Image: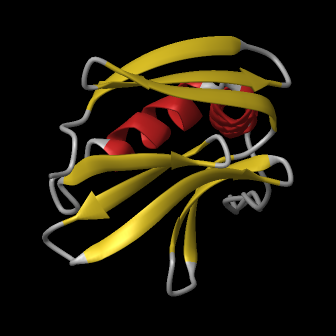
Amino acid sequence: MKKVLMNKSGFTVIETIVSLFIFSISLLLITSYLYIQKKIKNDDFSDFFFYIQNIENKNYDFTFCEMNNDSPVFYSEINNKKYVLEKYKNMIRLRTLDGGHIPLMDNVEDVFWQYKNEFLISEIQTNKNKKIFKTYLKKSE
């Protein structure tokens, strides 16, 4: 008797089910990642945090100098420079008097600053939220 050899090329049902399972898990992870990225992009909290973090940054160690055209002016003894915090177009930026700037927040509709009792009060209106922050800054001597 001759033995008949079967050709075993192609996928079995088990292999197909496993590959579909792996594909569906991958698709789920990708859509979850994209959803989280979209939510983070639309969240102003990270922008507000970045704004406060830069004003209170110990690498600058800002002290308050004056209000110039409704914009606070800071002095950094570490860098020996003056900086202006201002609204420019639809953003808040920190710029030096020598030129150059650091964008701190985007999508800003309106901003109001006030210095009172060694606190810089920032009232910021974005496309979605309105926040008020108090930041401790010593007065320059």
Relative side of 138 to 115, left or right: left
Q: Residue at x 71, y 30 (%)?
A: 111
* Residue 11 coordinates in the image, percent (x, y): 76, 48
Q: Judge by depth and name the residue closer to the eye, 71 or 99.
A: 71
- Out of 121 and 126, give the one closest to the viewer: 121
Whether residue 97 is visible here, answered yes or no, is yes
What residue appears at the point 36 percent right and 45 percent down from the top-left corner? 55
Q: Quadrant of residue 40?
A: top right
Residue 28 visible, this angle: no
- Residue 3: where, in percent of width, then height? 67, 59
Instruction: Work out which residue is located at the far bottom of the displayed protein and give it.
Output: 98
Where does the image place residue 124, in percent across and percent down from the top left? 66, 24
**Residue 46, percent across and down?**
52, 32
Q: Is residue 80 left or right of residue 121?
A: left
Q: Quick check: 99 above or below 76?
A: below
Q: Is residue 19 above or below residue 4?
A: above
Q: Quadrant of the N terminus?
A: bottom right
User: Which residue sits at x=80%, y=30%?
Assistant: 110
